Image: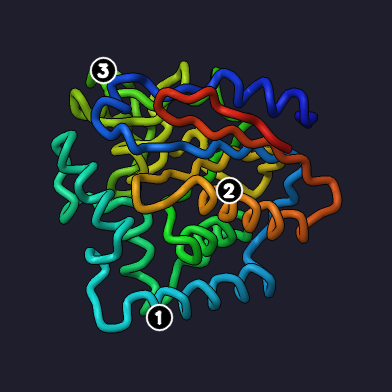
Amino acid sequence: MPDLGMLREFLGGGRVDAAVFALRPDYRAMLLAVGGVVPGPSDQASEGVLQAAEAAAGEALRGRPVDQLPHVAAWREAYRAFGAKPQRTRNSLEALLRRAASGLPRVNRLTDLYNAVSVLHQIPLGGEDLTRYTGPPRLVRATGAEPFDTVADGIAVIEHPDRGEVVWCDDAGVTCRRWNWRQARRTQLGDHTTAALFILDALGPVPDEALHAAADDLVAHLARLGPGIRAARRLIAAGATPGEGG
């Protein structure tokens, strides 16, 4: 079980390549590492947060389409900048907002919580099993040779990103394609996850304070699942020395 020092050390190795900042100088990544997580199936608490998120999405989308929300529109521009078509491969925030009216997915309480916080704060947010990482997280522009462990038509397969695609990866391969579109099977949260990495993505419309508020909200929800939560965070931005906090 990683202690706070180990969580901070893990985050200290994380980086965003200069090529990504060249694409979007306004990009910031909030890395949140949490130990002492208590996993489990969807429950009454996660259901309540999901329902609140669905209601918030309904209010945000009242009278306007999802692609006119400032942060969604910014992510659509970012996707186009590296050659992705946002109508075909939507960023995770837009995908969730489009599902909210008919019901957000119910997966397990860890996934339910971070999906709800993503919608409530209108920030793309991914969660992965930290113990299944090989080396620290890095956001790069792909060569096209990196392996991506996924499922297609119910069968486990290895795919490869497009050359120049923005991907999160570790030493073993891609952990999330197209910035925040689809996560790898290898590092996905599961029934036995006790340490998790959450990545919160922000572009210009979202200030740093809003990123920290979303991270605070997620940690508060996780803390209700068990008394032993330990959390460390790191904000990575262009041309700045990222800070850490617990």
What amino acid type is highlighted by mark number 2? His
8 relative position to 227: left or right: left
Q: Residues within 10 Å of mark 3 (few under 14, many from 20)?
A: few
Q: CA distance from mark 2 to mark 1?
A: 23 Å
Foreground tag (3 vs 1): 1
Residue 116 x/y as whole percent: 52, 64
Q: Residue at (50%, 41%) from the top-left corner?
A: 199
Residue 123, placed above or below residue 25: below
Locate the C terminus and report the quarter of the image it occupies. Answer: top right
Task: Say which element carries label 3.
Answer: loop
| Residue that carries the numbered disc 1 in the rendered image | 59
Nearer-the-camera pick, 209 or 78: 209
Would you identify the image quadrant in which residue 119 lies? bottom left
Foreground tag (2 vs 3): 2
- In the rendered structure, are the residues bearing label 3 and label 1 in contact, judged by CB atoms less than 8 Å apart? no
Task: Say which element carries label 2.
Answer: helix
Q: Residue at (67%, 20%) from the top-left corner?
A: 9
| Residue that carries the numbered disc 2 in the rendered image | 212
Residue 225 x/y as whole percent: 76, 58
What amino acid type is highlighted by mark number 1? Glu
81 relative position to 48: left or right: left
Would you identify the image quadrant in which residue 34 lies? top right
Q: CA distance from mark 2 to mark 3?
A: 34 Å
Residue 125's disc is none
Residue 146, placed above or below residue 3: above
| Residue that carries the numbered disc 3 in the rendered image | 145
Which callout, 2 or 1, points at the residue further toward the start of the chain?
1
